[in-house]
Image (cartoon, rainbow, N blue to C red):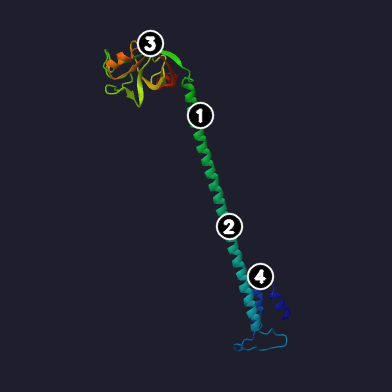
Amino acid sequence: MDKINERVSKRNLGFTTLAILLAVLATGCGQNHEENKVDVVESNTVVYNPILDLQVKKIVEKQAEIERQEKEKQKALKAAKTKAEAKTKEKAERKAEEKTVAAKTEAKKKARREVTTQAGSGSWDSYVLTHYTATCRGCSGFTRTEIDVRKTTEYHGYKVLSVDPRRIPLGSIVEIKDGDRTYKAIAIDTGGAIKGNKLDLLVGSNKEAVRLGKKNIKLRIVRRGWQDAKNKS
């Protein structure tokens, strides 16, 4: 009996061994003994021991608790691993998105730099500038690009300029230096007498056109227009 007690007191006793032990103990009990009494049938008969039965029960419960705690531990480890993997994945996706945004931003900056480079490299050229009105002889009040200028001398904040499309593409934004005065204009009109380095600037009245007269100015292209892009395509 002492040997049995020693075995069942071990921490890692398996359920199979415990079942066998309980079966042996149950077999040794008398068929007709009353509850809570111990009957000794023979000197070599196994005696029912309620204290031992209680110890075995405690060992089984302890083993079950150990296994439950181990399962909880494994479950917690698995959850922590899943959470860490999700966090790592989210971080990688965010980094990839930031990289994509940065690449797009850089591409836009590069495109703007290329447009600026193609705009005319900032060099100033000499031109002869005259002035006209929307109601001048042969004028319809609409530009070559079909913009109505009958009640205005500007388009999107730029002064309206008549050019030779072979020199300055239609749609171009230009900067004009007239003595100490510098302003920007947009090339959206043409004229029969506007050839080569001749330009015509739209003004509000014939009186103003006469007063301003003819001038020698400097001009540089800030942004080349849509006509240039169309011709290249």
Name the residue: 56% across, 49% down: 88
Residue at which label 4 appears:
14
* SS under mark 2: helix
* SS under mark 1: helix
Pointer 3 or 2: first along the chain: 2
The mark found on residue 41 in the picture is: none
Number of the front mark, 3 or 4: 3
The one of 95 and 137 positioned closer to us in this rendering: 137
Q: Quadrant of residue 75?
A: bottom right
Pointer 1 or 3: first along the chain: 1
Label 1 Cα neighbours within 10 Å, binned few <14 / some 14-19 / many ≥20: few
The mark found on residue 110 in the picture is: 1
Residue at which label 2 appears:
78
Which amino acid does the dot numbered 2 rest on? Lys
Q: Is residue 105 above or below residue 180?
A: below
Which amino acid does the dot numbered 1 rest on? Lys
List x then y, in percent, for residue 186: 38, 21
